[in-house]
Image (tube, rainbow, N blue to C red):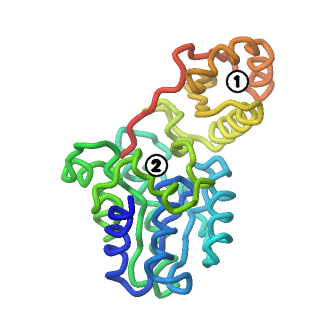
Amino acid sequence: MQEKYEEILNVIRQFDKVGVCLSGGADSSLVAIAAVDALGKNNVIAITADTEFFTGEEMEISSELCRRLGIRHLTPRTGLLSDQKVMANTEDRCYYCKKNVLSVVKNAAEQANLEVLLDGSLMKEEGMQYEKLCNSPGGKALAELGIVCPLRLCGVTRSQVRDLLKFRGMNDFIQPENACLATRIAVGEPITIKKLRWIRAAENYLSSLGYEMVRVRVQEQNARIEVAKEQVPMLLEQKESVIEELKAMGFHQVEIDEEGYRRVAIL
C-alpha cells in the first residue's frame, strides 16, 4: 500500500494549495488525508456541500475529519431544491445534481483562492475503463469543471480505499458506501422536499436500531426497506413495529425487501 499511497501523494504534489470536495465518504476522506500529507494542513481546505439530499451524517463525519486533520472546513449551501432539472428526476438527474453540487463547491474554492479542486472519485472496480468513467454522468460534470481526481488517476479501486485508510491509520473513516437521498426515489417520479425528509427520517430511525446499509426506496407514498443481507432476519422479526413507525411518518404502504441491500451503480 505504501507504493500506491506515494503515487497518490505525487499527483497532489503537483499543486501548491488545494480544495477537497469532502462528502464524508471513505473515498473523499482518503483524498483529504493524502492532501494534508502531501502539502501540509495550511495548504488544504475541505469543502462539503450542505444539502437536503444528504442524510446529515455526512456533514458530521466531514467535520470530525477536518478537526482531526486541523484543516479549514467550508460548508456552502446548494441550490438543488430550486433546480428543476434535478427535481424532475429524469434519467439525467445524476449529471445535473453532480454539476450543481460541484459548481457550488468550486465557487467556494475560487473565493478561497484555491489553485485546484480535488475529488474522491475512483476506478470503482478492477478492470474498469478510465474512458468509460469519464463519460459517466459524474465523470462529465467533473471534466467540465476541471476537477482533479487523484484516486481515479492512480487506478485506485473501492477495495483499495479501505486498505489505504488502514495503512494510514485512519480506520475510523472507513465508512459504508452511501449515495444521495435522491437515488431512493424512482426515476421519473419528481423529487420533493417532503419525500427527502421522509427518507432521511426513516433511514435515521432504522440506523438507530443498529441496521447497516439502510436504504428506504420510495415510489409515490410507498416505501421498500433494504438493509444489509445478514440483517434481514432481524428486520423481519421487528417487522410489525418498524412498519408501524414508518406509517406514522406518513408512508402508506411499507414492505421489506427480503433479498437485502443491492448496490446501485453511481459513477
What amino acid type is highlighted by mark number 2?
Answer: Val
With 186 as the anchor, is 256 left or right in this view? right
Whether residue 129 is visible, yes or no, is yes
As helix, strand or loop, the secondary structure at mark 2 comes to helix
With 114 as the anchor, is 148 left or right in this view? left
State the image coordinates of residue 103 (x, y, percent, origin top left).
44, 67
Relative height, residue 67 to residue 213 (above, below):
below
Q: Residue at x 55, y 21 (%)?
A: 229
Name the residue nearer the viewer: 34 or 62: 34
As helix, strand or loop, the secondary structure at mark 1 comes to loop
With 109 as the anchor, is 142 left or right in this view? left
Name the residue nearer the viewer: 41 or 93: 41
Give how far apart the Cα atoms at labels 2 and 1 are: 23 Å
Q: Tell me the number on the disc at residue 86.
A: 2
Mark 1 nearby-residue class (10 Å; few <14, some 14–19, many ≥20):
many
Whether residue 104 is visible, yes or no, is no
